[in-house]
Structure formats: structure tokens, C-alpha cells
Image (tube, rainbow, N blue to C red):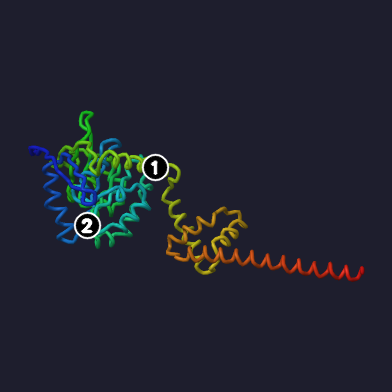
Amino acid sequence: MEKKREGNKVVEVIDTTTGYISNYSMSLRLKRNLDDKIIPSLHKKDKDYVLCIDGKEGAGKSTFAMQIGKYVDPSLNLNRIVFSPEDFREAILSAKKGQCVIYDEAFTGFSSRSSLSPVNKVLVSLMMQIRQKNLFILIVLPTIFMLEKYIALYRTKFLIHVFESKGTRGYFKVYNSNKKKLLILFGKKTLSYSPKIVRTNFKGRFYGVFALGDEKVEAKYKKKKEQALRNSERTSMTSAQVKFKEQRDLIIWLFRKHTRLKYREIENLLLDYELEMSFQQIQKICAKFGDKSIEEEEKRERIDKKKEIISKNKEKEVKSDENGDFDEEIKESEG
């Protein structure tokens, strides 16, 4: 028989930076697991924690993720809720020990495995950083089956699947590590969460309360989300395109490093081969790989411009002097 579902409790979370108090309902069983397992793992056992939250579009995954993240890390703010692989990497690198970072893939409506390829790469490449900083990482996406198998099976500790019941949002069920593995192995072909495949008794409810702050903060979050959506529509790339872009950037930086050409010189050189790339863009690419000579380059360009102006002025002065001498010679000869 299925165990009786536990009720909820209203939790009070005080933001450690602003002092804002958030109140929202949380499942007692979920709260107990956060209190007894996740929070001690981050702060006492010197471990990291990667959690996946998935479900259909509009099911409330992002809201639920923020409620969990804020409860575990009261300092969580908009800077550590990100919507692109690049921002995800930056958030992990700048996060402090024990903090939470939420990557929200769900809102874009992507459904291809290739769209998560950069995220998989970030998780693999920054695994040491995540461990050393004991970070709490929440990955929000349409389905865990999109994640790379290694990440899905071994790096995520458990899965929370969010769903609707009879047209009502706010339901979830939790798959622990073992049940998550069985779900991935046996449910992947049909992308099914049916209890016939894997049954879980860990279920509960949540409600759509924004956990990060007041109405102004919520408005900023929505604006950030809309901007990220526009950017993703303009710059959405396949995994192959992402790979080629990374290789292109690396080649440009290596070329700059070994030739010591100026950014404008590289721009002009590329134009000779009908490749349009501004020197500002080249500058940003080189900075990404640690080129710290941008300010020096700008100073050097300003100095070179001043030298050009001075040399041109000197040439004008010399010519005017010569012309003056010539005019005097003419006058003398005429006299």
C-alpha cells in the first residue's frame, strides 16, 4: 500500500543580505530531507549537491527550484539564477562556499539534447570547483533524459519531477539515487515517469510563491528571463556550432598571442579575406582567454595616434618653412 502523504508547513526564510522575510508552504518530508541531508552535506560534511528538477512547460519548476534554493541558501539572489551556459560558468566560478546556483533551461522551450551540450560540458569541466566550494546546484529542465548519462546517473543526487494533477499545478514526486537510475535506464525509451516503470512514495505539493523577494525583485526576475529568452532566440546554436565557435575563438587568441598584432590589425587582416569581425569583438575573445593587455593596447593606440598627428604637424611645418624660403628666393631673384 502507498504511504500516507505528509502535509505541508509554512517556512520562514530571512535573506542574509537584504533581511527580507519570505514565507511559503513546503512539504514536511521534503523539508526534513533538506534539513537532515542536503544542508549538513554542504556545511558539515564538506560535499557538493547537484539536484535535477524536471517537468512539462508551465508546471512550476522554476518557482519550486527557487523555493528549495532559497531555503538551503538564504543568500540566493538573481545573480545566481542563470539561463545560459556562459552565465552558468560565471556563476559557479564567482559563487562562495556553500552557495546555491540555479540553471534554468526549462523556460526556453528547447527540446533537443544538443541544446544542453554546453551545460553538460560546464558541469564536467567545473566539477572540481563545485566540489571544492560545496555548491548546491539546481538544474531545471524539461526532462532528465536530456542530460548526459554520466551527469544524470552519477552527478545528480536525486530527481524531483513536477507535474499537474487533474489540471492543477503544484505536485511533485521525488526519485532517490537508486530509483532515479532505474527510471533513466528503463524509462528512457518511452520518456515515461509511469509508476509501472518505477514507483516512488515520496510525493508532495508546493504553491506558486516567489521566494527571492518582493514584487520589485520578481519584476526584475521576469525582465531578466525575458531578455535571456530573446538572446536565446537570436543566438541559439547546435552543439556543433558551439564547438566551432569555441575553436574559432581559440585560434584567434593563439594568432594574437604569437603574432602580437593589434586588434585593429587583425580586423584588417580578416577583412582582406572577406571575414567581417570588429576589433571590439576580437578584443572580447582575447580577454576571455586571459589577454590582460586590452588597456595597454588602447593606450598604445592612443599614443600611436598622437605620434601620427605630431609627425603630420611637423611635416606641415617643414613644408611651410621650405615654401617660405622658396618664396624669398623668388623675390630676391626678381629684385
- Near-viewer residue (265 or 270): 265
**Are the residues flagged by discs 1 and 2 in contact, CB closer than 8 Å?**
no
**Which kind of residue does numbered mark 1 sit on?**
Gln
Quadrant of the frame with the N terminus: top left
Relative image position of residue 89 (x, y in whole percent): 34, 55
| Residue 227 badge | 1
Label 1 or label 2, whichever comes before in sequence order: 2
Q: Mark 2 sits on what residue? A: 98
- Near-viewer residue (263 or 113): 263
Give above or below for 250 relative to 18.
below
Relative image position of residue 68 (x, y in whole percent): 20, 46
Tag 1, which secondary structure? Answer: helix
Q: Is residue 71 left or right of residue 270?
A: left
Relative image position of residue 187 (x, y in whole percent): 24, 43
**Label 2 neighbourhood size at 10 Å, few (<14), some (14-19), many (20+)?**
many
Which residue is located at x 17 percent, y 41 percent? 23
Give above or below for 120 relative to 65.
below
Q: Is residue 118 left or right of residue 261?
A: left
**Which kind of residue does numbered mark 2 sit on?**
Gly
- Most extreme residue toward the top is 166
Tag 2, which secondary structure? Answer: loop
- Near-viewer residue (299 or 287): 299
Quadrant of the frame with the C terminus: bottom right
| Residue 125 badge | none
Which residue is located at x 37 percent, y 40 percent? 226
Disc 1 from disc 2: Cα separation? 28 Å
- Most extreme residue toward the front is 335
Q: Is residue 256 left or right of residue 49?
A: right
Q: Quadrant of residue 183?
A: top left
Q: Is residue 180 left or right of residue 248?
A: left
